[in-house]
Image (cartoon, rainbow, N blue to C red):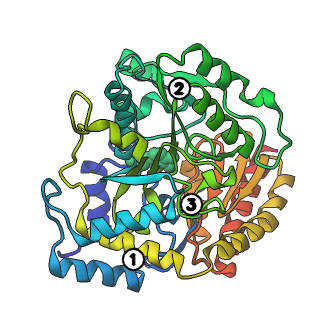
Amino acid sequence: MNSLPLPELMSADRQHVWHPYAAMPNNLPMFAVKSAQGVYLELEDGRQLVDGVSSWWTCIHGYNHPRLNQAAQEQMGKMAHVMFGGLTHQPAVQLAQKLVAMTPEPLQNVFFSDSGSVSVEVAMKLAVQYWHNRGEPKKHKFLTIRKGYHGDTFATMSVCDPVGGMHHLFGDRLVPQFFAEAPQIPFQGSWDDSDITSFEQLLIAHRDDIAAAIFEPIVQNAGGMRFYHPEYLRRAKQLCEEHGILLILDEIATGFGRSGELFACEHAGISPDIMCVGKALTGGFMSLAATLTTTHISETFAQGEAGVFMHGPTFMGNPLACAVALENLTLLESYDWQGTVKRIEAQLHRELEPCRALTAVKDVRVLGAIGVVELHEPVDMAIVQPRLVEQGVWLRPFGKLLYTMPPYIIQSKELSMITDGIYQVIASISRTQE
Ligand SMILES: *Cc1c(COP(=O)(O)O)cnc(C)c1O
């Protein structure tokens, strides 16, 4: 592939290419990346940026990792892809074994798919079909909590925060679900039972219609970067069990150590009936996700009307992605990732806390390798993104939130560049607001 000259690249991009959550033509700043190495992105114009968002929380071990590259190359020499219907292979089976071993004990069966959204679709279909298998087809709705995010497809949108997810745009195309109030007590706050009242009331009132409760454990991510109390999760689990409702936990963002535990549900010492993982699964190498279930759920499918689970993506269990994911998880287990995340957490605490003194800042919060600064007003991306880039930092703020979820391999000096970039850019906004 020959390279286009930079001006031509940028104008063709504007003319033809749709970017995430963007207008066409895109009217916000855009930066072309030539290559990436470790925690750095190298732009086409030669500038180097420290990536503080791990390419949307995926590349926990940085870019161009020799071990991931080698795993991909070895697998490419054998087969990049083969269909999964009627065929199986080493990478998918060994990755399934690894996922079963890493996740809480009751999760035993793995359904591979190509993206987080699809893994949530699969979780929701599994829950609905489970009740159908058991002769209770009326249980097909979902109970979720506000401020959540589960993906961009229609079923996943129906359980995203109704305001943040702009439900009114899609009107009756979205299946109405049950929305409990978002938890208000923070991760380290003191627990009060009233926090879960709304969830409890909805669950009890509609238990005959609800297939499953679905939400993100401990950390609500793209819906607002909020950290809630582990007791909420314990109570939710109890309520689901008591009232015969499945629990789906979406660990796509939190899985593989990000919140300080391998999976965020471990903060509460509970396990779900169905769990979704994605994002960091391949270390940001390529797209892969998985939905895990208990045998209690999977066992019902043989006796159901369909006799099978009605889902099967074309690229299911892609060998290349599975081989890289297996190496990435092996790598994660090979060092003290928990100590590493703790060190990142301590430094984020130390270096983001001073932001609190800035007038534009409403709140500062840190959990694991997640640092969040919430502002009073929405961030103007047209101004903020180029300022961050000038400081050698890549971040992707949204709404009123500036946050970092850096790669675990980040050095203390590089992390300081990120926290300093956050501080400086907010300081510059605070000045203009005064
Ligand atoms: C990113 C994300 C998804 C969607 O994953 P995609 O790979 O973008 O489809 C779902 N749930 C959570 C919690 C996420 O963070």
First of labels 2, 3 by sequence position = 2
Q: Could you say where residue 358 lies in the image, as x and y percent from the top left?
A: 83, 52
- Density class for disc 2 (Cα within 10 Å; few <14, some 14-19, many ≥20) is some
Q: Secondary structure at mark 3?
A: loop
Q: Nearer the viewer, mark 2 or mark 3?
A: 2
Q: Nearer the viewer, mark 3 or mark 1?
A: 1
Give the residue number, with chain letter if any, for mark 3.
395
Q: Secondary structure at mark 2?
A: loop
Q: Is residue 272 above or below residue 135?
A: below
Q: Residue at x 68, y 81 (%)?
A: 413
Q: Looking at numbered disc 1 in the image, what kind of residue is underneath it?
A: Glu
Q: Could you say where residue 164 lies in the image, as x and y percent from the top left?
A: 54, 32
Q: Residue at x 65, y 72 (%)?
A: 338
Q: As rendered, which of 331 and 168 lies closer to the eye?
A: 331
First of labels 3, 1 by sequence position = 1
Gap between marks 3 and 1, in whole Å? 27 Å
Q: As rendered, which of 139 and 152 lies closer to the eye?
A: 139
Give the residue number, with chain letter if any, for mark 2.
162
Quadrant of the snapshot with the N terminus: bottom left
